[in-house]
Amino acid sequence: MDFSGTLSILLAICVMCLLLLSTRKKKTWGNLPPGPTPIPFLGNMLQVEVKELIKSLRKLSETYGPIYTFHLGSRPCVVLSGYKVLKEALIDKAEEFSGRGDFPAVQMWSHGNGIVYGTGERWRQLRRFAITTFKNFGMGKRSMEERIKEEAQYLVSEFRKTEGKPFDPTFFLSCAGSNIICTLVFGERFEYTDEKFLTLLNLINSNWKLMSSTWGQLLFTFPKIMRHVPGPHRQIYKNYLKLAAFVGEQLKMHKELLDPNNPRDFIDCFLIKIQQEKHNPNTHFNDETMSKTTVNLFFAGTETVSSTLRYGLQKLHEEIDRVIGPHRSPCMEDRSRMPYTDAVIHEIQRFADIVPMGVPHTVTRDIQFRGYTLPKDLNIIPLLCTAQADPTQFKNPTCFDPSHFLDENGRFRRNDAFMAFSAGRKRVCLGESLALMELFIFLTAILQNFTLRTLVAPAEIDITPESSGLGSIPRPYQFCLLPR
């Protein structure tokens, strides 16, 4: 037999094997929604732009509808698109869709541990503990409001030093947002020049950008291969180790100064919980879980607030002057009398779409959903951005329009399709109230003290994100803040 004949037989055998594997997978995964036909091993990745994965997934929903199957490499996932189907899954069936899906960039370090990327009973206990602890330390209350007001004054002070000259606000906004998490977790804030604090911020910002880059998307799609491929994505794991080392130093200091009768912050409370559970062989409270949970909190609470503020420093002066005036600091009591400001803050989050996909989910048991069988542990990709751009819920979804959150009398109104903090009682962001408090106080404090001046005409500013993977990264830009 000549070489060409042998090659033909080998190719035929390979095709048959792939078909058999495909048939077995269909039997395993059951009656999934239709979607684009996958290529063995590559899945549907040749049918999308990896750099614009979110945009490609939204485009596919126009062809296959609000629920369809998409293969990330060899992994089948079900994509949910549009407010109605997202509500049915994440809110109406919150328990069934509460599992945490694959997120290799984090899981290669956390191994499913921690409060954001965990699952199962350990995650449930951690979430309950965190919610209770944060409430005890004033999240959503006056005591936390005072901390945020104090940080807002530090931020305003730094902005005054620019003396009306052009500057990029990214660094200062990141410092301010991260310091609020520091006060909750470590019981202290850091100066904006503190070297360890700056290292922490750089690690968080670096990972946020890497996970949203093309390399990050490839790691998300082909984790087993990309872990062995050289490239900038490998820095993600190294950065997590450095973050864990920073947290480890804080844990050591807290253990030395711990007073069980007078906890100062989240870490103290966690250490006390560890002591209380030391005789429980099945406890989920230990140093490793505490470290990973603390890193989760920093990552979730630092970049999203600063990115949102970078999109929205303008308008609003009239309402701020009328309600607050020039001589006192803004407070949360002002919020109910400032519906336009509240609407702008929500519209910034909707329009900026900082976390367009959210973190993947899984179904926790075999379920029937919209006529399809979704087996336990199936990955779910919730396109939260499609709820926030749903024309049935927002009259001008492609435009920045604060009236999306105002009624006919100019009063603030909520919109259930607003999913900037995810949705559903199980996986909604536990820091939502804290983030909204930060956004309101920081934004009003800045605009109370400064007038914003852009370097180019507003119509010429490019507000499309620099990249859009895990998060929509705002483009670097400069403006001037002129003292009022």
Image: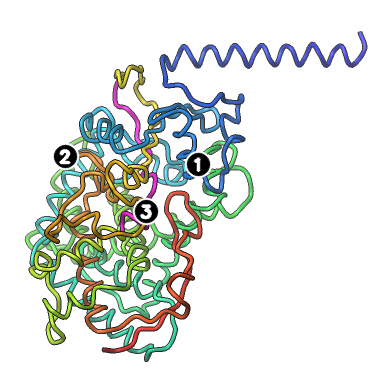
Say what secondary structure mark 3 lies in. loop
Residue 111 is left or right of residue 269, and the answer is right
Q: Nearer the viewer, mark 3 or mark 1?
A: 3
Q: Is residue 196 above or below residue 2?
A: below
**Which residue ends up furthest to the top in the rendered image?**
1
Residue corresponding to mark 3? 353
Looking at the picture, how far across and down is residue 23, in whole percent?
54, 12
**What's the amino acid at mark 3?**
Asp
> 221 or 340: which is nearer to us?
340
> 254 or 318: which is nearer to us?
318
> 167 or 231: which is nearer to us?
167
**Residue beneath the point at 21% across and 44% down:** 416
**What's the amino acid at mark 1?**
Phe
Q: Is residue 90 magenta?
A: no
Residue neighbourhood size for the residue with mark 1, other residues' Cα within 10 Å, grouped as few (<14), some (14–19), many (≥20): many
Q: Nearer the viewer, mark 2 or mark 1?
A: 1
Q: Nearer the viewer, mark 2 or mark 3?
A: 3
Residue 247 is left or right of residue 186, and the answer is right
Mark toward the start of the polypeptide (3 vs 1): 1
Q: Is residue 278 above or below residue 151?
A: above
Looking at the picture, how far across and down is residue 354, in whole percent?
37, 55
Q: Is residue 244 above or below residue 332?
A: above
Residue neighbourhood size for the residue with mark 3, other residues' Cα within 10 Å, grouped as few (<14), some (14–19), many (≥20): many
**What's the amino acid at mark 2?**
His
Residue corresponding to mark 1? 220
From mark 2 to mark 1, how far is it between C-alphas?
Answer: 39 Å
Mark toward the start of the polypeptide (2 vs 1): 1
Q: Classify residue 399 by image quadrant.
A: bottom left
Q: Which numbered disc covers residue 279?
A: 2
**Residue beneath the point at 34% across and 50% down:** 397
